[in-house]
């Protein structure tokens, strides 16, 4: 199965700067293995030592989070779009408050 994988900025050094790359596989695990074969270092960045997706790496197949499907065993259909999205943590207590400007006279 051929899929298109959207690559986040942080991983584009592994893809020669490409924002999207082709990959093949019938499951997420097979797609990750194919990415590793063509872009060495990708598996290490996506997976932890136990063979699971890293905690702060989200993978979506056509807008569905694989963690809520079958994880790495999630089936990938021909032509699907896989997105790798790094999780973003919340702000900090010292964050600057942004206020909307009030129109003059109010």
Image: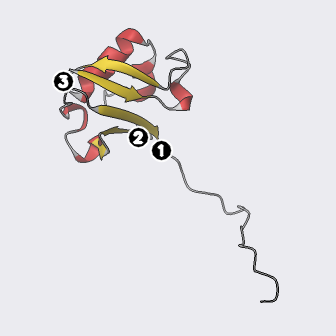
Give the mark nearer the N terminus: 3 vs 2: 3
Looking at the rendered image, the quarter that the N terminus falls into is top left
Q: Position of residue 67 (x, y in %)?
A: 28, 44
- The span from disc 2 to disc 1 (Cα, nearest Å) is 8 Å
SS of the residue under disc 1: loop
Mark carried by residue 55 = 2
Of tags 2 and 1, which is closer to the observer? 1
Task: Give x and y (percent) for residue 7.
Answer: 46, 28
Residue in view at x 37 percent, y 15 percent? 36
Name the disc covering residue 104, or none.
none
Badge 1: residue crowd in 10 Å (few <14, some 14–19, many ≥20): few
Judged from this view, the residue extending furthest toward the bottom is 106
Residue 13 or 41: which is nearer the viewer?
A: 13
Q: Is residue 63 visible?
A: yes
Q: Quadrant of residue 102?
A: bottom right
Q: What secondary structure is marked by label 2?
A: loop
Of the pair 83 and 55, the residue shown nearer to us: 83
Task: Tell which tag, 3 or 2, sits nearer the viewer.
Answer: 3
Q: Tell me which label, 2 or 1, sits earlier in the chain.
A: 2
The residue closer to the viewer here, 21 or 53, is 21
Q: Mark 1 or 3 closer to N-term? A: 3
Residue 23: give x, y in percent of width and height: 32, 18
Side of 100 relative to 31 (left or right): right
Q: Classify mark 3: helix, strand or loop.
A: loop
When the figure is inspected, residue 74 is found, relative to residue 16, above or below; the finding is below
Q: Position of residue 50 (x, y in %)?
A: 32, 28
The C terminus lies in which quarter of the figure?
bottom right
Residue appearing at x 56%, y 56% in the figure: 90
The numbered mark at residue 26 is 3
Residue under numbered circle 1: 87
Number of other residues with Cα within 10 Å of mark 2, as a class: few under 14, some 14 to 19, many 20 or more: few
26 displayed left or right of 46: left
């Amino acid at each position: 199965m051929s899929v298109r994988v959207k690559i986040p900025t942080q991983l584009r050094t592994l893809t020669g700067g490409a924002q999207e790359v082709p990959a093949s596989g019938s499951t997420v695990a097979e797609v990750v293995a194919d990415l590793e074969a063509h872009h060495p270092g990708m598996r290490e960045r996506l997976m932890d030592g136990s063979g699971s997706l890293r905690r702060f790496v989200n993978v979506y197949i056509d807008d569905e989070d694989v963690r809520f499907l079958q994880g790495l065993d999630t089936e990938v259909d021909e032509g699907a779009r896989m997105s790798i999205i790094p999780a973003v943590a919340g702000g900090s207590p010292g964050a600057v408050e942004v206020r909307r400007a009030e129109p003059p006279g109010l």
